[in-house]
């Protein structure tokens, strides 16, 4: 009986590991499928038409509005995957691609939070103004990198379209 219990414990431990590894793999696959075409497979979009995620997207977790913005973006909110898968994918985005930019105390997303936020997508006009205000607040109050400003949305001038992303001095 004891042996059975030990075996069962081992089995549960192995499947829990397999499950978490599986969900990271499927989070990455979902990202590549739904997002990588625009944001780059490593989160570097290499152009100012689409903001970089790599090394900077975690800054949005500093403020409640920034946290909500990440899930309420139409491309994110309407991605046809479950709340649970969306939470796992966005955790990969903010903590994986975002590298050290997420604040140390930031909580991971879970299915309940994501499910609630995605019901209120930012579908109106003014998404880029909303982003600009968020970014200024993150830079002023939370020490986020000014590199967040490089994305200019509609106001982008195509003159340097083929240049790489600008480096901050
Ligand atoms: C068609 C291109 C496109 C696709 C596909 C796309 N995005 Fe985006 N994404 C953008 C653009 C452009 C913005 C800037 C906000 C805006 O104007 O919509 C953005 C903004 C973001 C931001 C906020 C970053 C910032 O600095 O403002 C995150 C996070 C994000 N996208 C994640 C995703 C994820 C996750 C997916 C896949 C489910 C995805 N995006 C799919 C183009 C895209």
Image (tube, rainbow, N blue to C red):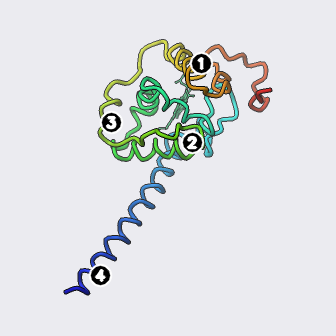
In this image, 157 relative to 1: left or right?
A: right
SS assignment at label 3: helix
Give residue 113's mark: 3
Q: Are marks 4 and 3 in contact (CB under 8 Å)?
A: no
Q: Earlier in the sequence, mark 4 or mark 2?
A: 4
Q: Earlier in the sequence, mark 4 or mark 3?
A: 4
Q: Residue at x 49, y 29 (%)?
A: 62
Q: Position of residue 109 (x, y in %)?
A: 39, 41
Residue receiving disc 2:
36
Mark 1 and mark 4: Cα distance apart in space: 55 Å
In this image, 105 relative to 165: left or right?
A: left
Residue receiving disc 1:
140
Residue receiving disc 4:
7
SS assignment at label 1: helix
Q: Residues within 10 Å of mark 4 (few under 14, many from 20)?
A: few
Q: Are marks 2 and 1 in contact (CB under 8 Å)?
A: no
Give residue 48's mark: none
Q: Residues within 10 Å of mark 1 (few under 14, many from 20)?
A: few
Q: Residue at x 59, y 37 (%)?
A: 101
Mark 4 and mark 2: Cα distance apart in space: 41 Å
In this image, 11 relative to 4: left or right?
A: right
Q: Earlier in the sequence, mark 1 or mark 4?
A: 4
SS assignment at label 2: helix
The answer to whether the beta carbon of the residue marked 2 is less than 8 Å from any atom of ligand 1 is yes
Mark 3 and mark 2: Cα distance apart in space: 24 Å
Q: Residue at x 49, y 51 (%)?
A: 29
């Amino acid at each position: 009986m004891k042996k059975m219990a030990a075996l069962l414990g081992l089995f549960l431990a192995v499947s829990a590991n397999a499950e978490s590894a599986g969900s990271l793999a499927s989070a990455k696959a979902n990202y590549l499928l739904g997002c990588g075409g625009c944001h780059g497979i490593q989160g570097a979009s290499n152009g100012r038409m689409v903001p970089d995620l790599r090394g900077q997207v975690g800054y949005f977790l500093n403020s409640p509005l920034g946290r909500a913005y990440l899930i309420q973006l139409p491309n994110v909110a309407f991605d046809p995957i479950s709340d649970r898968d969306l939470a796992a994918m966005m955790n990969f985005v903010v903590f994986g691609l975002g590298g050290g930019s997420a604040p140390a105390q930031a909580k991971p997303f879970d299915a309940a939070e994501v499910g609630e936020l995605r019901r209120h997508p930012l579908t109106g006009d003014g998404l880029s103004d909303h982003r600009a205000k968020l970014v200024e607040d993150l830079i002023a109050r939370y020490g986020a990198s000014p590199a967040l400003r490089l994305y200019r949305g509609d106001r982008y001038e195509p003159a340097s379209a083929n240049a790489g992303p600008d480096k901050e001095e």
